Amino acid sequence: MYKRQGLPGDVEEQRALLLSYGLFREHDLHVPVGSLSAGQSRRLALARLLARPADLLLLDEPANHLALGLLEQLEEALAQWPGAVVVVSHDRALRDRFVGRRCEIRAGRALVTQGSEALAG
């Protein structure tokens, strides 16, 4: 017999958690995982990361291959993340919209600023 695996809690708690991230609409929750589009699969992967208790979220080039709408949803979900987020990205627009503490490595030196302040060159 198949044993259900996943997050603890009942189905309604899990549904509410997924919807709280803003990555899914109600009707998306009824689509079988094997039938998800590429964008929906990326949303699910992000939701799985967000749903697990952790103090630190590491993302390497999270904006690669994302449609604009999904990138905006990613940014909104990350803004709700209660822990620390480390994002490695070459996407200037993503970096410019980031509002937390920033550290940029240039010529072997770390430059730290708050939010969207301009980094020293």
Image: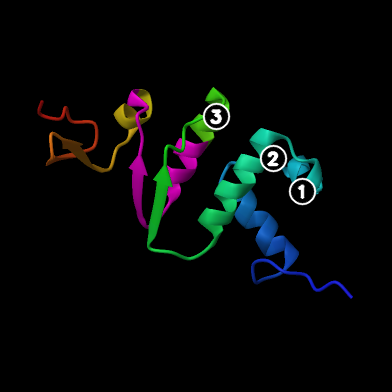
Decide: few, some or many residues near mark 3? Use Cα within 10 Å; few <14, some 14-19, many ≥20.
some
SS at circle 2: loop
Decide: few, some or many residues near mark 1? Use Cα within 10 Å; few <14, some 14-19, many ≥20.
few
SS at circle 1: helix
> Is 57 in the magenta?
no
The one of 9 and 45 positioned closer to us in this rendering: 45
SS at circle 3: loop
C-alpha span from label 2 to label 1:
15 Å
C-alpha span from label 2 to label 3:
18 Å
- Please provide the residue range marked out in magenta: 74-92
Disc assigned to residue 25? 2
C-alpha span from label 3 to label 1:
19 Å
State which quarter of the image contains the C terminus.
Answer: top left
The one of 121 and 8 positioned closer to us in this rendering: 121
Residue 47 x, y percent position in the rendering: 58, 50
Is residue 24 toward the left or the right of residue 114 in the image? right
What residue do we see at 65% from left, 34% from top?
39
Dot 2 and dot 1 residues touching (CB under 8 Å): no
Which residue carries the number 3 mark? Answer: 66
Which numbered disc, 2 or 3, marks the residue closer to the eye?
A: 3
